[in-house]
Amino acid sequence: MKSRTSLTSWKDLNEHAQEMKKYHMSEIFEQDAERFTDFSIRLEPFLLDYSKNLITHNTMDKLIALAKECEVESWREKMFNGERINSTEDRAVLHTALRDRSHAKLMLDDKNISDDIKKSLNKMKEFSDNIRQGLYKGYSGKRITDVVNIGVGGSNLGPQMVTEGLKKYSDCNVNVHYVSNVDGTQIANVLRPLNPETVLFIVSSKTFTTTETITNAKTAMKWLVSSSFDQGAITKHFVAVSSNKANAMEFGIDEDNIFDMWDWVGGRFSLWSAIGLPIAIDLGFERFTELLEGAHEMDKHFKTAPLEANTPVILALLSVWNCTFLGAQSQAILPYDQPLHMLSAYLQQAEMESNGKSVNWHGDEIDYPTVPSIWGELGINGQHAFYQYLHQSNNVVPADFIGSVESVTPVKGHHETLMANFFAQTQALMQGVNEEQVRADLKAKGRTQEYIDQVAPHKVHKGNRPTNTILMKRISPKSLGSLIALYEHKIFVQGIILQVCSFDQWGVELGKGLANKIKAELESDNCNSPHDSSTDGLIKYYKSVGTL
Ligand code: F6P
């Protein structure tokens, strides 16, 4: 298989990028009144406007040629059909099957996995209904009022982001809490106001080997047993979601209380599985199903739309264009919708853990930039914090602006102010303001020539900063499902084009292994393992000052 840099379309795009760098987006907008029409897609439940990128029709043709030369369509088929495209772990990648509302038969290793999925969904429904209706009782016969999800990474970010995103749809029947950090402060704060008689713990861990999660779960178990004086309380108050049943049972969780996970679901793509149990408890199973439906709609679009009208493909190609060909090194995710306040944290894991890699499928060093670092914050908060950098630093940060036509919580006058900023920012980032305009403006305001000469350069905004706008109708379980699936598929396409293994995460192992060794040293008097002098010095200082 050829390296990506030797592809005709790649070389062509490289040359084209040098040419395009000579242009400013505002000039191209002036020359072409049809840009919005040509470079936007309306697809239920959102509109994607990608016209504010440094692209022309020619650019898009070349990017589509790249997608074709990289065989995106055939890789897409392989993923949906359950081929083992996670090559370094020899696994299929089938999070799409979890939300396949057609319940089509899907054979994997001679087994119809859609039967397993149905079984798991039924178990989730029954369990979440029982909790919500108060039929499920704790050890003392009281109904469950609080659920604490203990998990980290994919076993936390997806469910928590969705719980936060869909708060408006929760009937607050049961309070859902999340514990992800092994810093005891978090679990202590969560447990403090809770009553052990009415709490249910969900230990979410695909592998059931994650030290942080196991440590938190042990603390929760101790808290429960010491407050209830009843070892049997564990059966009523602990459930697990895991593909490692043996470890979960050894930990002390009843077999019947274990919800399945499968090796063909990556942690960061797992909220559609029983990892989404806290969502189902919070919103009800019907709403959880709507979330799956929204994602399934996006799956159908991704699977069938021609590449040039395929929203995940377009977002992926633009990311490759902006980062690999034009040199941007980071990308901002900027939601103008309070419910989406955890979206950038969620996408950080989804994109960076998937594609933040530097060898290709064959294990060869990659000699082009892969994915940018992903960061972001709610847009309005960002405007008063880091937008200065977006507008005037000498690094160009492409950004996705995500907003809604309707607020889930209309408060008179607020939404218009919010959305005025939403529209203004992408315009300002694209157009900028040149020195001539700045000077004319200052002159019109009656400023002295001396002041104008001094201040004008500081007020110049170069503009030409690429943005995508995703304008949703309204945040709902269904639209959020579609939005998340949009990004999941974008990440998949990016991985194919950049030729990286998107579904493994070896990069998190080295630090984990070292932490285990160092923990043993922190707990013993000897600290004789060889470290570098910095790590040694830090550990010795910590041990000499602390009171372990
Ligand atoms: O350390 C990274 C990671 O393996 C993620 O990929 C995963 O989502 C997270 O840890 C949690 O893993 P688990 O669900 O197995 O506890």
Image: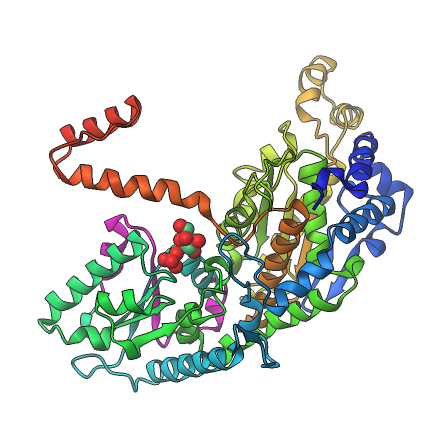
Q: Is residue 152 left or right of residue 376?
A: left
Q: Is residue 7 placed above or below 411 in the rendered structure?
A: above
Task: Give the residue drawn at x 65%, y 51%.
Answer: 496
Q: Is residue 176 magenta?
A: yes
* Relative depth, front residue between 29 and 102: 102
- Quadrant in which the C terminus appears: top left
Q: Is residue 400 magenta?
A: no
Q: Which residues are magenta?
A: 164-193
Q: Is residue 150 left or right of residue 54?
A: left
Q: Is residue 448 placed above or below 83 in the rendered structure?
A: above
Residue 229: x and y in percent read: 8, 71
Residue 386, picture quadrant: top right
Residue 502: x and y in percent read: 56, 51
Residue 365: x and y in percent read: 59, 35
Task: Give the residue drawn at x 65%, y 72%.
Answer: 297
Q: Is residue 121 placed above or below 419 in the rendered structure?
A: below
